[in-house]
Image (cartoon, rainbow, N blue to C red):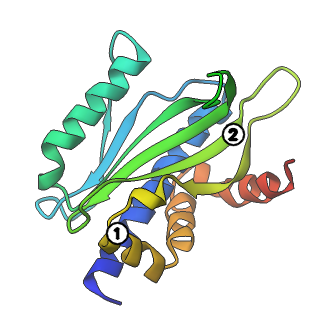
């Protein structure tokens, strides 16, 4: 496995862990605050977690993006996760809910966005994932990012990261199985 494959494996593991973390909070019917997870050579013992709180949810997301943009050179890998309302490009109407993770790593020129659609917990139904995790805008990737992402099984690495979460990891496989059954 090349160095770039190893960094993508680490990156996708972070993304999976963060998706599981955010999904676990959302499954309880709560809105998960934007969170960043990152690794650095200075702290090799594990990933560090930051929570962003602000006057509004969107302000907290923007604060997270600013911190990641300004500090990303210090990180080996980073991921910023938050909740989004997906909108129709034609009329702007809401088309669903999703957990969104923007992630990057040393050696990748641009961040990569991962999206996991979900149906929120309601009085009549439990939280569940809708479909598989998707990569957004691969047509905008540089040739290096495209080659790196195509050379590894990023979905397997993401799943390994999700299953490593101490709480939500126990139900990740069940959520994924149920997601594939969703219409």
Identified at 27% across, 26% down, the residue is: 63
User: Where residue 164 sits in the image (x, y, percent)?
Assistant: 51, 62
Q: Which residue is mark 2?
A: 118
CB within 8 Å, label 2 to label 1: no
Q: Which numbered marker is on residue 145?
A: 1
Q: Is residue 75 above or below residue 86?
A: below
Q: Residues within 10 Å of mark 1 (few under 14, many from 20)?
A: many
User: Where residue 17 sits in the image (x, y, percent)?
Assistant: 48, 54
Identified at 33% across, 42% down, the residue is: 36
Q: CA distance from mark 2 to mark 1?
A: 27 Å
Q: In this orientation, which residue lies closer to the viewer: 131 or 22?
A: 131
Judged from the image, the secondary structure of the residue bearing numbered disc 1 is helix
Identified at 69% across, 39% down, the residue is: 118
Quadrant containing the N terminus is bottom left
User: Where residue 149 sits in the image (x, y, percent)?
Assistant: 43, 72
Horizontal side, residue 121 vs residue 84: left or right: right
Q: Give the mark count.
A: 2
Horizontal side, residue 7 vs residue 116: left or right: left
Quadrant for residue 104, please give it. bottom left
Q: Is residue 11 above or below residue 143?
A: above
N-terminal of the pair, mark 2 or mark 1, is 2
Quadrant for residue 50, please give it. top left
Judged from the image, the secondary structure of the residue bearing numbered disc 2 is strand
Q: In this orientation, which residue lies closer to the viewer: 90 or 46?
A: 90
Identified at 14% across, 64% down, the residue is: 41
């Amino acid at each position: 496995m090349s160095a770039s494959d190893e960094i993508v494996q680490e990156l996708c593991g972070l993304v999976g862990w963060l998706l599981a973390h955010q999904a676990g909070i959302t499954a309880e019917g709560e809105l998960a605050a934007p969170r960043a997870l990152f690794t650095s050579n200075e702290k090799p013992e594990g990933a560090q977690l930051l929570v962003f709180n602000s006057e509004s949810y969107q302000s907290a997301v923007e604060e997270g993006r600013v911190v990641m943009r300004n500090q990303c050179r210090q990180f080996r890998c980073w991921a910023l996760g938050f909740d989004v309302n997906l909108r129709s490009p034609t009329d702007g109407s809401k088309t669903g809910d999703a957990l969104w993770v923007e992630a990057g790593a040393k050696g990748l020129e641009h961040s990569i966005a991962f999206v996991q659609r979900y149906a929120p917990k309601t009085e009549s139904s439990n939280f569940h994932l809708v479909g598989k995790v998707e990569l957004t805008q691969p047509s905008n990737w540089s040739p290096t990012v495209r080659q790196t992402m195509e050379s590894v099984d990023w979905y397997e690495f993401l799943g390994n990261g999700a299953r490593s979460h101490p709480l939500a990891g126990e139900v990740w496989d069940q959520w994924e199985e149920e997601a594939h059954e969703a219409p």
